[in-house]
Amino acid sequence: MRVVVQVVEKVYQEAHLEIPDGLTEETIRQHIVGLYNSGEMTPDLNIFQVEFESMNATIVQQPQEAA
């Protein structure tokens, strides 16, 4: 018997960044999104917390098991 299992988890990541002073709230958002989208922030992201959400299992019939 083959079973496909899906696990859903929430992963919280945290990064400590240096950004320029004097930016508006909107500019700070744009700066952070730009760092994230460019991949520059990825090396700084550390897993902070993982929360289990759900688990699902589906039995997959093998061809020889089909009726």
Image (spheres, rainbow, N blue to C red):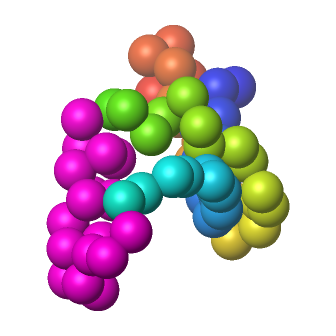
For the question of whether residue 54 can be seen, the reply is: no
Q: Is residue 37 magenta?
A: yes
Query: Could you tell me which quadrant the N terminus lies in?
Result: top right
Query: Could you tell me which quadrant the C terminus lies in?
Result: top left
Instruction: Give coordinates of residue 23: x percent, y percent.
Output: 27, 75
In this picture, which residue range is highlighted in magenta?
Answer: 21-38
Residue occupying the point 52% across, 20% down: 62
Q: Say above or below: 6 vs 44.
A: below
Farthest front residue in view: 22
Q: Say above or below: 65 vs 28.
A: above
Instruction: Give coordinates of residue 48: x percent, y percent.
Output: 78, 57
Residue occupying the point 70% across, 43% down: 46
Q: Nearer the viewer, residue 31 or 10?
A: 31
Q: Nearer the viewer, residue 54 or 28?
A: 28
Q: Main secondary structure of the magenta part?
A: helix
Instruction: Give coordinates of residue 8: x percent, y percent.
Output: 61, 58
Instruction: State left or right for residue 24 relative to residue 39.
Output: left
